[in-house]
Amino acid sequence: MFKKLPGDEAHHLVSTTPDTAVVFRPAVVQTPAIITVIIFVGRLLAGAVRLLWRHPIASAVVAAPGVIWTLYGWRVALAVTTLPVSPLIPWAFFDRASFNHWIGWRLLAWWRLVWVYRRHWQPVMVISGLGRHVRGRDYLPRLVGVSCTSWADVVAVKMLSGQAVKDWADRTEHLAHGFGAVSCRVTVARAGRLLLTFPRCDPLAVPLPAVSVPETPSVGPVEVGMQENGQPWRLKVHGTHVLVAGATGAGKGSVIWSAIRGLLPAVRAGLVEHWALDPKLMELSYGRAIFGDRYAASPKECADLLDEAVSVMQERAARFAGVQRNHVPTVEDPFVLVIVDEVAFLTAYQSDKGLRQRITAALATLTTQGRAVGVGVLAALQDPRKEVMNIRNLFPDKIALRLDESEQVDMVLGDGARDRGALADLISPRPEVGAGVGFVRLETSLDPIRVRAAYVSDEDIRHMARDSVGGEAA
Ligand SMILES: Nc1ncnc2c1ncn2[C@@H]1O[C@H](COP(=O)(O)OP(=O)(O)OP(=O)(O)O)[C@@H](O)[C@H]1O
């Protein structure tokens, strides 16, 4: 407590030693011990009443054994406490999934709420700058609740009035480290309410084997890997165009090959055709037999193949005009998926200006007009800068695998994607941990989803090529 001086007096103070701060001596008030004790006991009682009021069931569960012990002895108390819990043990052993669904995750959520989030809430909010300390009072965002899934804690928060989502998105690192997680993602639940996702473990840390080839022909969405929440990652290829961006070794090949693999039954049924452009001669050449004569490697061949795709597109557009607005794959008009490995080889690094312009024009035509007539483009790209790929915005769906620089994340996924947790520049460069890992934005949500593509090995590709040759021969 500081002795208060009226403002006028402070103005008229004259220091006899210039450049020396005026020091106000605090007035010390001795509080009688009895008052301190009364305040302490009062707070204790108020806390106990608040606890009973807020958590009546939990309090009863804890207090009941003590009461029974006192009244009937410890044997009865032990029997009463263990009997209701005993059926849970076999349940947890034999049907872990349903046990976790009904009991396990709720218990864990309660524990994480008490032990991690409520305990650290005040210091983390104040130090990260999300809470305010005004005239001795803390104004903190409200911790609404915690729920747990198999891999993450989801914390519901009510923001302080006047706060913006960006205030939180800018502090994901503070929040993650403050609550002992490796990362934090911010999602808007509704006006003023956020969901913060703190991963507890990483289900994508180990490589995924190739997804088995589907039984029935389908043009997608094709299962190409797994989402962070354990759900399959299904990639839409029909009715869109997809750009896969990632540094060298990021695993672009695994996305492309998983998509090709998932469409194989539809290829055999004649509903899909894969057209491959392989300017690096490394990736797609491995399964060359899958593409038949729709395979091009030299820039001239690539330009010719793209022009052919444009012709197919224009012929269909002329036929469909006024008859149908969307493409339905049939044997007569199959879905054509034009697959381009390292598209910048053809658009930016191509020394022949004439070919470069031809290829860029054909790609731009396909990506602007091909969707509705059943011609899609799936392209891989190492460097997403505009100078390298000036038509990248013509691809409605983009996937950001490991990127070299943080600025590249928003170039691929759109403004604000990195702030919302798409930390593609922090994906591990170790192939076993980070290859095929990336972020996507699904149509239904602005929030980026972390995914991992399944790894289609050389052996898998050999099988696929052999089967497609066998299939054709049959
Ligand atoms: N989904 C995946 N899961 C695990 N490991 C993978 C996966 N995809 C690729 N890898 C490993 O990472 C290595 C690099 O992958 P890949 O060649 O597909 O990357 P890329 O992005 O196509 O690179 P580049 O642009 O240089 O061709 C592969 O040799 C493989 O061992």
Image (spheres, rainbow, N blue to C red):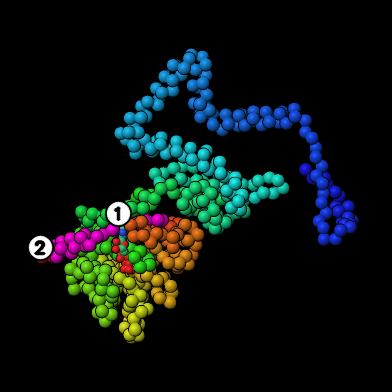
Q: Position of residue 309 (x, y in %)?
A: 27, 75
Label of residue 208 in the image: 1
Residue 460 within the magenta-colored segment of the rendering: yes
Q: Nearer the viewer, mark 1 or mark 2?
A: 1
Where is 451 relative to 86, above or below? below
Determine whether the beta carbon of the residue marked 1 sits less than 8 angstroms from the nearest atom of ligand 1.
yes
* Left or right relative to 401: residue 189: right
The residue nearer to you, when weighing 236 against 431, is 431
Q: Position of residue 194 (x, y in %)?
A: 52, 50
Q: Position of residue 150 (x, y in %)?
A: 39, 44
Which comes sooner in the sequence, label 1 or label 2? 1
| Residue at x-position 58% and y-position 52% | 128
| Magenta stretch bounds | 449-471
| Residue 153 in sight in this render | yes
Amino acid type assigned to the residue bearing label 2 in the image = Ala
Amino acid type assigned to the residue bearing label 1 in the image = Leu
Q: Quadrant of residue 319?
A: bottom left
Residue on which disc 2 sits: 474
